[in-house]
Every structure is written in C-alpha cells, then in structure tokens.
Amino acid sequence: MFVIAYCKFYPRSVKKLASILVAIGTAVSAYLAPQMSAAQPAPTIAIVQVAPVNAPPGVARTVTISGQWPDSCVPGIVVNSSLAAQTRILLVSRVTNPIGGRVCLQVLTPYRFEFAYTPIETGITRVLVDGSASTRGEGRIVTTTNGAIRAAKDISGTWYDPGSNGSGLTFTHGYLTSDTVFGTWFVYDRSGVARWYSIQNVVWKDSGSFEGALFETAALPGKCSIVIADPACPQPNVSVKQIGTVKATFTGIFLLDDTGPQATIEAFSPTNTLLFSSRVVPISL
C-alpha cells in the first residue's frame, strides 16, 4: 500500500529545501565512498583444485583457485613459489583493493584464477590461500615416483554414518609421510552389542580409494575387576584374526562442493561376500 501526502510549498521554500538536500547528499556520498572502498569484508572459502592431483616430479600442474568474493572488488593474487622448495608450502596471497578509490558493491562476485606449478621433488606441497590467520583455502599437490599411488587428501579424523547414528570410523593417516592408514570401525551386532574392528594393511588403489584388511580382536572373559552387570574395562587381547577385507571410496574431499566429503566403506568376507557397509561423512577432516 502506498500513501501519498500532499504538502504546499512556496517557490522560495522549495528552492531552499532543494539546495539543502543536495548538500546533504553530497556530504553523505563523500563520506560513504571511501568507507565502502576501504572496508575489507571477510573472505569466503576458496576452492583449490590441482590437475593432475598425483604425478611424478617434473610434470606441470594446473592450480585453480575459485569461489565467490563477498563484494564486487575481487582481489588479484600473488603466488610465492619460492617457499615451496624449503617448506613445502606454496603461498597464494590475495591483493586487496586492486583499484584505489573504487566503490565496492555488496554483491557476491564469482572469481577464478589459474597458474602453473611444476614440482621437482617427491612429497606433498600444501597450497595455502592467504597463508595467514585469515586463510580461507587449502589444497595439496601430490608428487610421487613413477607408478606410485598416494592419497590426494588426508583422511585423518572421525567419520560417522548419518543413516545409523552411533556407527562410524576413525582414521589415522600418515599423509605427509608414509601414507599409511589405520582405522577403527565401530558397529553393533544383531543383539545390539557394540563391536569394534580395525582396518590395517591399507593399499591405495587410486588417489581416492583404498583396500585393506579387516581385523577383530578378543580378550578372555571375566578379567574385569569391576563388579557390575555387563562390565567393560581395558585389558590385553588374546586373539587377533582377519575376518575379511575393506574397500573404501572417498568423494568430495578434494573441493568444498555442495555435497561435501563422503565415503562408502564396505566390509567383505574372505569369499568376497558383502558383510556390512556404511555411507559416512566426517565430523572433522
């Protein structure tokens, strides 16, 4: 609904009022323009992608940094590759306010930068966007010897199954060193009793999937000193047996997309029969 008000002004009053409004508008514009251009809004998450993710030394990589900036003044970037050889860190710094005195409109603005980088040694090179307390993006350049396969992402952390909350896995991953993985898988049996398994002897089949052995341990009954119903306590195991194999496939861990990181973990018997499986997402990664 619109309300129209009618007021009567004399010509001299109208002219004086107009001059006052123009003066106020000029003063407000002069004040706001530098304030808008000087404001530094918090950066949004930068997506870092590397192609190819995994390659031998001497193979050129294309590093892409993309995302949405919170205003129309998208900053440029400066790549400091001199850090990579000593610290395994490739620093990508944002250069804010590329044009002095520019008015920044408060609208999300997409950006995309590409640059080439060629590692000369094996190992993991971290790609840090900003490289300060306000870092908003990180990626990895994986460099291996010919024929070697390494994970493209550190999977260390706790993963849980939203479809069966209370079941999940934890991984300890030597990503920056040996690339080995040790996992624990907590599930329940048919009677509702908690069961724990360990995942060992992991071999990466490609940069986003692995296969390993599934082990179960057992201890002697009646060893707990706590006298309560169904006690549980730490004690040494007396048997460790492999009950099958594990296959894991990770998706969405290389970039922050709408789906986010996910993994399908499957347990198979020695005859390759599916025992159980979970579709998990990370609590921390």
Image (cartoon, helix red, strand yellow):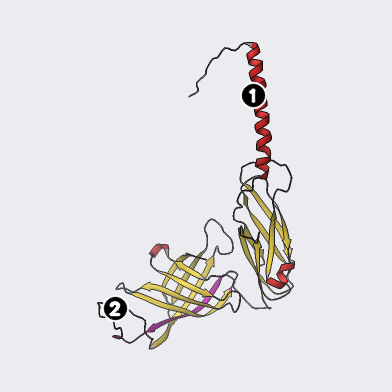
Indicate the amino acid at tag 2: Pro
Return the residue nearer the eye: 226 or 253.
226
* Relative horizontal placement of residue 123, taking residue 277 as reference (left or right): right
Please tell me whether residue 105 is drawn above or below residue 186 in the rendered image. above
Dot 1 or dot 2, earlier in sequence? 1
Residue shown at the point (61%, 46%) measured from the top left: 108
Q: How far apart are marks 1 and 2 (CA)?
A: 81 Å
In the image, residue 268 lies at what x, y percent?
Answer: 44, 77
In the image, residue 182 lies at what x, y percent?
Answer: 50, 78
Return the residue nearer the eye: 46 or 97.
97
Return the residue nearer the eye: 249 or 232.
232
Q: How crowded is mark 1: few (under 14 residues within 10 Å), some or many (20 or more)?
A: few
| Quarter of image, res 133 | bottom right
Examine the structure image and report whether residue 217 is included in the region drawn in magenta.
yes
Magenta highlight: main SS: loop
* Relative horizontal placement of residue 42, taking residue 146 as reference (left or right): left
* Residue carrying label 1: 21
* Relative horizontal placement of residue 9, taking residue 160 as reference (left or right): right
Is the C-beta separation of discs 1 and 2 under 8 Å? no
In the image, residue 78 lies at what x, y percent?
Answer: 73, 58
Please tell me whether residue 43 is drawn above or below residue 37 in the rendered image. below
Residue shown at the point (71%, 58%) measured from the top left: 114
For discs 1 and 2, the disc positioned in front in the rendered view:
1
Residue most extreme to the bottom: 238
Indicate the amino acid at tag 1: Leu
> Which disc, if any, is residue 231?
2
In the image, residue 55 lies at what x, y percent?
Answer: 68, 72
| Quarter of image, res 99 | top right
Please tell me whether residue 137 is drawn above or below residue 173 in the rendered image. above
The answer, for residue 104, to whether it is visible in the render is no
The segment highlighted magenta reads: 206-233
